[in-house]
Amino acid sequence: MLAEIDTIKEEIYDIVAEIDDENVLQAIKTIITNIHSKTIDQVTDKRDLTGYIKEWVKNM
């Protein structure tokens, strides 16, 4: 599993490195900052993020 996470991280870094739009980079930073570590039991919990995303877009 650790190898999969490292591969995903590398792919994300490559994609983000190609982004030139400062607003998009700020949005990504905000999302990453607000990601909380989950235990294995919480990974499968479903949450409705619609309200959060609407508020976030309004603040942009």
Image: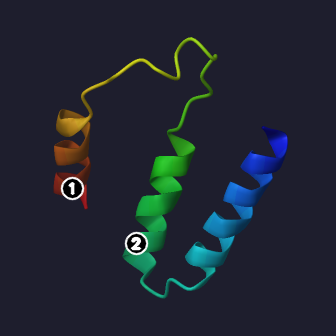
Residue type for callout 2 = Val
Mark drawn on residue 5: none
- Give residue 52's position: percent from left, percent from top: 25, 37
**In the image, residue 41 lies at what x, y percent?**
57, 11
Residue 8 sits in quarter: bottom right
Identify the residue at image location x=73%, y=65%. Answer: 10
Question: Camera-side residue: 7 or 30?
Answer: 7
Q: Residue at x 16, y 46 (%)?
A: 54
The answer to which of marks 1 and 2 sits earlier in the sequence is 2
Residue drawn at (75%, 48%) of the image: 4
In the figure, 12 relative to 44: above or below? below
Indicate the secondary structure of the residue bearing disc 2.
helix
In this view, 37 is above or below 11:
above
**Number of other residues with Cα within 10 Å of mark 1, as a class: few under 14, some 14 to 19, many 20 or more:** few
Q: Are marks 1 and 2 in contact (CB under 8 Å)?
A: no
Identify residue for label 2. 24
Asked if residue 40 is positioned above or below residue 60 in the image, the reply reads above
Count neighbours of disc 2 (C-alpha within 10 A) and say few if under 14, some if 14 to 19, many if 20 or more. few
Task: Determine the residue positioned at 52% across, 15% down.
Answer: 42
Badge number at residue 57? 1
